[in-house]
Image (spheres, grey):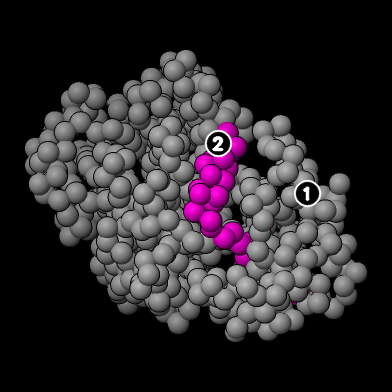
């Protein structure tokens, strides 16, 4: 849909505003008006986000307002911003947008559950950004667009224009500013499209818990026969998107969900998959989803044939593809399902000491959910020369608004109410730490997930290690038994124990931040060693 569209109520006076262009039209505009943008040999729009090829979490701000300041978990995740500075940045963004010859407006929905669905409006200057958000939000029908009305949440994307570093509260030329009261986000100094996606998620992370609904940074699938669902929590690089692309199950979504009294629902209308080292052989569903209508970001391609080289990381390791849910053959539309039977915490343990799969007690489930552990490895970031433990509460720290305990309590209530099994699955290293051991083969992790979904692992034998107290599953079809017990997989068991105790110390130090807001039983469910 394209029509004359009035945005003067928010200060936009540009005469040429394109509202909800279809993908072919956005392709035309991108090729015509965005230098460097092209089309891959599979039909994807190839676009570049400029200097920023990832999110800027240190530049995210939330307006401190009397109506919401008691709700917000202020600190290293949510930096406060005063109302005047937000107004200055908002006007700066609108002034920039008004200098553009044409703008793009996307009106779409967040949340497949009609009871909590939010109307989102995106105002941007790049066709690439408009197509990206058309993919990541839920597209309305033509009839719904006619009746769309005023939005519940607005994104002003002026990312090509920098923030003024001399403005109070600014620490760089990038600023991502959220006002909970105005229900708006202002983007300055970053053209990375993922900032828009996560701005919507941050808003939903505030809104849903107020209604008693758990918002989750997870992927979700459901059984094609029974309809029973499961959710997979995990930070970037742990396998959320890859493992949810299961041809034997329906895909509900790959990244953001809500869990209400009626079951689970996807917040988004599409998927945003890592594309680095992607092959059809390893991830056929995702590979085939990257076709006409999808966006590929910051990839390198062959100029002669426009064939993308997914192994070339010369621009960034964070190459990604954004595509609508309908591109996945196994997608369940609408993206809703019943209550999960299993909750799975994915962690990429580069220290190689956690078991490939462990069954968690309810108290352990809360401990590891609040901890949100994974690890960085050498070569992924400047200055990282050895494995580095990373903790992100609720497996989504940068996007939380409330204190992590609020989300943990909601999860605990649902686990108890629906008798859900909880698992810790290590997609990282086995037989030694990074540099000595080897990465857990994807086929073994898939076999573990299959075993969880089939119910086979619920009655499988376990052994409890003396450092973490985790009940490691010792038998799983398709996985060598020696790999299921980390201590046995290491050549030197004493070296395993030494490394495990070092990681346990990191867990304890991290959890001190949350100790005052958690029960003693949860605090005692952490590693047994390391205190």
Q: Is residue 494 left or right of residue 61?
A: right
Q: Is residue 282 magenta?
A: no
- Splitting the image into 4 quarters, where does residue 198 fall? top left
| Residue to which mark 2 is pinned | 406
- Splitting the image into 4 quarters, where does residue 349 fall? bottom right
Q: Is 54 or 446 nearer to us in this picture?
A: 446
Q: Position of residue 140 (x, y in %)?
A: 19, 49
For the point 72% across and 36% down, which residue is it? 515
Where is 433 relative to 205, above or below? below
Q: Position of residue 491 (x, y in %)?
A: 85, 78
Question: Mark 2 near mark 1, Cβ–Cβ under 8 Å?
Answer: no
- Splitting the image into 4 quarters, where does residue 444 fall? bottom right
For the point 20% across and 57% down, which residue is it? 23
Q: In what element is the residue under mark 1?
A: helix
Q: Is residue 413 magenta?
A: yes
Q: Is 361 or 8 nearer to us in this picture?
A: 361
| Residue to which mark 1 is pinned | 506
Tell me where the magenta segment starts and ends, as one range. 403-431
């Amino acid at each position: 849909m394209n029509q004359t569209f009035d945005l003067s109520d928010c200060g936009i006076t540009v005469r040429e505003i394109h509202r909800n262009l279809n993908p072919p039209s956005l392709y035309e505009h991108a090729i015509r008006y965005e230098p460097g943008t092209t089309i891959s040999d599979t039909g994807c729009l190839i676009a570049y986000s400029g200097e920023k090829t990832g999110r800027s979490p240190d530049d995210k701000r939330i307006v401190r307002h009397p109506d919401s300041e008691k709700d917000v978990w202020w600190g290293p995740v949510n930096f406060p911003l005063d109302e005047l500075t937000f107004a200055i940045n908002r006007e700066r963004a609108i002034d920039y947008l008004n200098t553009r010859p044409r703008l793009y407006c996307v009106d779409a929905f967040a949340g497949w559950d009609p009871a909590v669905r939010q109307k989102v409006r995106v105002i941007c200057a790049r066709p690439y950004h408009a197509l990206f958000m058309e993919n990541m939000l839920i597209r309305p029908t033509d009839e719904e667009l006619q009746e769309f009305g005023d939005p519940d949440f607005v994104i002003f994307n002026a990312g090509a224009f920098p923030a003024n570093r001399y403005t109070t509260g600014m620490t760089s030329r990038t600023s991502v500013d959220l006002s909970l009261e105005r229900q708006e986000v202002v983007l300055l100094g970053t053209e990375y499209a993922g900032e828009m996606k996560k701005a919507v998620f941050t808003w939903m992370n505030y809104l849903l818990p107020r209604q008693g609904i758990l918002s989750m940074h997870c992927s979700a699938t459901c059984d094609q026969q029974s309809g029973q669902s499961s959710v997979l929590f995990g930070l970037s690089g742990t396998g959320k998107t890859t493992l949810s692309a299961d041809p034997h199950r329906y895909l509900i979504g790959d990244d953001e969900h809500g869990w209400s009294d009626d079951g689970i629902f996807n917040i988004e209308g599409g998927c945003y998959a890592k594309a680095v080292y992607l092959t059809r052989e390893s991830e056929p569903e995702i590979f085939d989803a990257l076709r006409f209508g999808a966006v590929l970001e910051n990839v390198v391609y062959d100029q002669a044939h426009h064939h993308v080289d997914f192994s070339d990381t010369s621009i960034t390791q964070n190459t990604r593809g954004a595509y609508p849910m309908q591109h996945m053959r196994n997608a369940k539309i609408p993206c809703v399902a019943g209550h999960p039977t299993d909750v799975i915490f994915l962690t990429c343990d580069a220290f190689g000491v956690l078991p490939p799969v462990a069954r968690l007690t309810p108290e352990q489930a809360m401990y590891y959910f609040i901890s949100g552990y994974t690890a960085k490895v050498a070569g992924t970031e400047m200055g990282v020369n050895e494995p580095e433990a990373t903790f992100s509460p609720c497996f989504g720290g940068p996007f939380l608004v409330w204190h992590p305990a609020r989300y943990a309590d909601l999860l605990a209530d649902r686990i108890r109410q629906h008798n859900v099994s909880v698992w810790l699955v290590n997609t990282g290293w086995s037989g030694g730490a990074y540099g000595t051991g080897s990465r857990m083969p994807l086929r073994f992790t898939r076999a573990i997930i299959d075993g969880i979904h089939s119910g086979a692992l619920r009655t499988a034998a376990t052994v409890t290690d003396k450092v973490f107290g985790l009940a490691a599953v010792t038998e799983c079809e398709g996985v060598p038994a020696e790999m299921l017990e980390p201590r046995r997989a290491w050549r030197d068991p004493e070296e395993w124990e030494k490394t495990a105790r070092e990681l346990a110390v990191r867990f304890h130090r991290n959890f001190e931040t949350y100790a005052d807001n958690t029960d003693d039983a949860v605090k005692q469910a952490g590693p047994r060693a390391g205190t």
